[in-house]
Amino acid sequence: MKKLIYLDHAATTPLSLEVKTAMEPFWSENFGNPSSIYQLGIRAKSALSQARQKIAKILGAKETEIIFTAGGTESANVAILGLSRAIQKTLKKPGHIITTKIEHPAVLNAVLALKKEGFAISVLPVDKHGLVSLEKIKKTVKPETFLISVMYANNEIGTIEPIIEIGKLLKKINQKRKADGLSRIYFHTDACQAAGYLDIKVDKLGVDLLTFNGSKIYGPKGSAVLYIRNGVSLKPLIFGGGQENGLRSGTENVPAYIGLAKALELVQKNKNEEIQRLNKLSQKLIDGILKSISKTFLNGHPQKRLPNNVNITILDIEGEALLLYLDHYGICASTGSACHSQNLQPSHVLQAIGLPREIIHGSLRLTLGQKTTNKDIDYVLKVLPDIVKKLRELSPINISLKNG
Amino acid sequence: MAKKSKQNSSAKLGTRKSDILGRGQTPWVYSQTVRDHFFCPKNFMKLEEEKKFKSNAQGMVGSPACGDVMRFWLFIDPKTEKIKQCRWRTFGCGAAIGSTSMLSVMLTEKGGMKLEKARKIKPQDIIKRLGGLPEIKYHCSVLGDKALRSAINDYFRGTNQLNRIVPEEGRIIDPDTKTTDKDIEMAILEGADTLEKVQERTKVGVANPKIIPEVEQLIRFYKEKYSISDSEGKNG
Ligand code: FES
């Protein structure tokens, strides 16, 4: 069988074997409901609490500040909708939310839903590398602002946002607001792509709410965390038996959350070595592609980017066609091309960094992971130029590269 | 019975099966025929062939739906009005490449298709021959059939049979030559970057100077849209 080279770790990661082992006893053996009073239930409950403590420790938070949910999308929705609905009543005017153009749909669409409910929203632009500007945030803050949601690292172009700086800025703004008798602004970050590689100590980041999930860090799908700083009150989206502090009713997915805690522990423990290793590989891939294929350029920030993200535009060809060819060679990748999306719209992230539609067509995202080897990179560098040559031969257009 | 006929129709046209590419909610797969044509495209215009290929009709269209571009070259036998040879290039997805390739086969098989018949080819005909396309990809086959009709018009224009030109939907800019904004877009994509060059191809405004400012504006618009330079080499 043809070897599979999986370079789509930003989409999802395989479950790591250690995580799988950690989860194993909680399917059929220790299957109890944590709410039950007998031993089986207590065992599940204490394992769940240990998992929560483990995560809290890594985040520099308290156990009570961690809730489990069924995914990154849910966590972001609880954070944004939950906070907004809790705060609504305390506000005289419609509340105001600030976010960025390059957020994941889980954040953008949640914010858009709130707009329909009457909230005011500002969606900030980013620069050509995908960075949001502190200046713009400062200028956009209004007396009615109560929430800022900025992603920690972008899933498409890998750009790392200045979360620490935004946290500091907000601290200052909030101090002044307190003196002025204004309500405080809360800060949420979507750290789904970042949790595997970056520091997620919540006090250092200055965030009040933080989202990350298992399926991007070699943990199980359908598992995620929302960190909620003590004193921040949210309204639940799901009602029932009152689990997870009343914010996420429903019997806890014990094995998944045990796996999530283990996964976070592992990626955070090994992150320094892994970053070094991946930086080398991704740099080799970037340099190799830019050198061997004409009319290509890197998307995202040249330095402030995730170590595993390579997003390159290859002019004059279309991304879905490129993916089909790569798949033919056993390589799994992704593109922001309109032809590859459900609504025939090009990637909103690549649009936000100023790329026109026909150029977004040629975007290729390769996201590396734990199992990616030097050999894999060599293989991609070997087959990609030929694929591009073939597709360019079929292409009637010839876009000129203006300024890289 | 009812169930069976439903199955049949979905097999004929779009299918919403599971996924090989899988971003988004309803992922798609292509039929084996689409994949065959995608990986081994028939009749596409090879680079080294372009200068030598004898064509007497050309067509180029852009898709408003997703921003793709398709180009056709035909050699039509003036006596029989049959399409003897056909070449194409496509800037688009797997379905776009597959359907253009299939269309080129349909046009030239069995000694070549008559122009009048070729003009009546519908996207559905191409989709059927392809063994179906995912619904979301129907528009990609529309593109090929549009490019073909634009080439046929080009043939009639070139052979001075202006009465046989059937303009595409698209806005007519010059009623005398039935030139539409799409024709101008096509000319720009073919490398015409001045009014004179666009007129060489489309004859737009030659007898109708008062529309020239509008034509010039369109030229500017499309040049900016594609930022195409006519001097640069293919892989330059
Ligand atoms: S050409 Fe864009 S979706 Fe097929």
Image (spheres, rainbow, N blue to C red):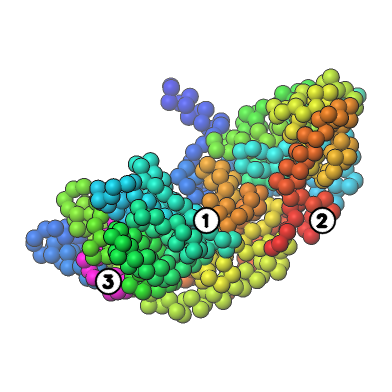
* Amino acid type indicated by mark 3: Ala
Do marks 2 and 1 share a subunit? no
- Residue A333 versus residue B158 in the image, above or below: below
The span picked out in magenta is A54-71
* Amino acid type indicated by mark 2: Glu
Label 2 vs label 3: CA separation? 58 Å
Disc number at residue A59? none
**Whole-percent x and y of residue B234?**
79, 55
Which chain does tag 2 point to? B
- Residue B213 versus residue A183 in the image, above or below: above
Find disc 2 in the rendering and name its residue.
B232
Find disc 1 in the rendering and name its residue.
A125
The reply to whether dot 1 and dot 3 touch (C-beta < 8 Å) is no
Which chain does tag 3 point to? A
- The residue under the point 66% across, 63% down is A297
Q: Position of A23 compared to A400: left or right?
A: left
Q: Mark 2 against mark 1, which lies toward the viewer?
A: 1
Residue A364 visible in the picture: yes
* Amino acid type indicated by mark 1: Pro
Q: Mark 1 against mark 3, which lies toward the viewer?
A: 1
Find disc 3 in the rendering and name its residue.
A61
Q: Secondary structure at mark 3?
A: loop
